[in-house]
Structures are given as structure tokens and as C-alpha cells.
Image: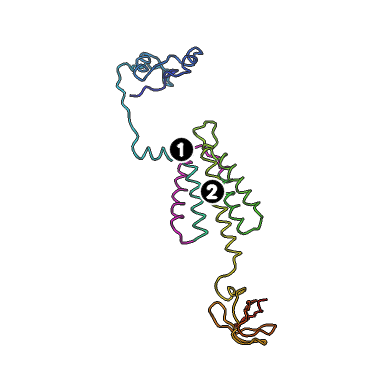
Amino acid sequence: MSTGRFERCAIASRSGNGSLKLKVIDFIAKDLNELLEKTDGKTVEKPKGAIKLATKGLKIQELEMGFRQRFLATLSNPNIAYILMMIGLVGLYFELAHPGAIFPGVIGGISLILAFFAFRTLPVNYAGVLLIILGVFLFVAEVKIASYGLLTMGGLISLAIGSIMLFDSPVPFLRASLTVIIPTVLVTAAFFVFVVAAALKAQLAKPATGSEGLVGEIGVAKTRLAPEGRVFVHGEWWNASADEVIEPEEKVRVLKTEGLGLKVEKVK
């Protein structure tokens, strides 16, 4: 059944009586069957001339959406599209920061493609998208630049503002809900802060392997160092030298490596 475009009609609602008094609508119908009865005989103006509707007695056939239509309709939800975009950005960042992880990159790529597909059906403000991307870059820059948290704060602000600006529509159901935006921004920020903190900790950590890892270790002199001798450090025998006389079985601390030997001092 195709009824064309009615001039002014409405299914019954709480505001229906007021609209009827204001002549915004022609009549009120409690259901589709009554709507078809009341529109029967109405004349509708068309570009090619007026037509008279014959709707009385028509059968109503409901066509339900298939799986594909339901899936695409779900993707078009602003909240879902927003969450997919954030998952995509986080996944791609994790993959770039840890090459070979594979899984985050795959999930991130799929999520980002689905998000941009959904953006085709939504009133997207690309200034919001750029602000979100800028926020992610500011979080990443915190690893390279010692800003004492300023870049992280800027990233958090940019992420929040970009999320609010992402969908440019006065209609609530075409915008992401604040109840979705706030937790998502906080979780995303917490993820990046955790990753940045872990990266900084790894950069500043004392080497645990190689010759650099021996600096600061405590060992035992096995021969008299005056100034050279042998020490036992970290389960290994080393040639060592010291600026003071160190007797056998005295504890020593490694100051630095010198070629294949160590520079040590007596533990006071």
C-alpha cells in the first residue's frame, strides 16, 4: 500500500488535541486502520495535479527488516558509531606501538571502517573527528616529550570536546549520549595514560641485562685488589680494578664497565 504524502494527519498522541485546535493536523486517528478510513476520499495536491485517495478497506502489510538491515541500522546509532571509532583508534595505536600484536590492529581496522561507514548516514562534524585524533596524538607525544602531564591534560580536553562536537544535530537521537561519551573518554584516557606511564617506566628503568645491567650490583672480591684483581658479581667472575685496596671476601659495588673488566669500590 502506498498512500503518498498526506497534507496534515496524525496518529493519536498526547499533543494531538492541541495540534488539531491549531489546525496543524486535519484529524486524529487511534491506529492505522482508522487512519486509512479517515484519509479515504481526501484530495492531495501533487505536482502533476490533485489526486483523490482511496484507502478504505486496504490491507496493512508490515515488512520487517532482515538481518542485514538491522545490522546496518545498529551501526547507524551515533553511540555505536562513536564507540567503534574510539576502539579503532586505540587498536591501531596499540598495533603501531607494539608491531606484531596483530589482534589489536585487526580489531582496530575493522572497527574504524565500520565507524566511517556509519558516519555516512550521520551528521558528522569533522572538526570533532580532528579534535579526537589530535587528542590521541597528544597522548602519544607524552612519551617523547617531558611535559609533566600537560600534553596528557591537553589530550583529555581535546578528546572530550571532540566527542561532544562529533555529531552536529539538534535532534538528541542523532547525537552521542553524554552517558556514553563520559565513560568512553575516561576509559580511553586511562588506557593512554597507562600506556604512556608504562613506556616512561621502561625508558627510565635500569638495564637488567648486558654490561650496563651490572652497574650498581654488589659482589665479592675473590683476590686482593691493589689496584687490580678478581671479583665475583652476578654469578660471574670478572677482572676488576679499584682506586683503593680491597681485601679478599670484602663486598664491592660495580661503578662501571671498562672493556672486559669492571671498575668497583668497597661497600662501606
Of residue 114 and residue 99, the one placed in the foreground of this image is 99
The quadrant in which residue 241 appears is bottom right
Q: Residue furthest right?
A: 243
Image coords of residue 10 (percent x, y): 43, 19
Using the numbered discs, state the Cα–Cα distance from disc 2 to disc 1 in whole angstroms.
Answer: 20 Å
Q: Quadrant of the C terminus?
A: bottom right
Q: Amino acid at mark 2?
A: Thr
The quadrant in which residue 230 appears is bottom right
Q: Which residue is mark 2?
A: 188
Q: How packed is label 2: few (under 14 Cα within 10 Å), some, or many (20 or more)?
A: some
Q: Which residues are magenta?
A: 99-128
The quadrant in which residue 72 appears is top left
- Judged by depth in the image, the label closer to the viewer, 2 or 1, is 2
Q: Which residue is mark 1?
A: 77
- Asked whether, in this view, residue 148 is left or right of residue 210, the answer is right
Callout 2 secondary element:
helix
Q: Residue at x 44, y 52 (%)?
A: 107
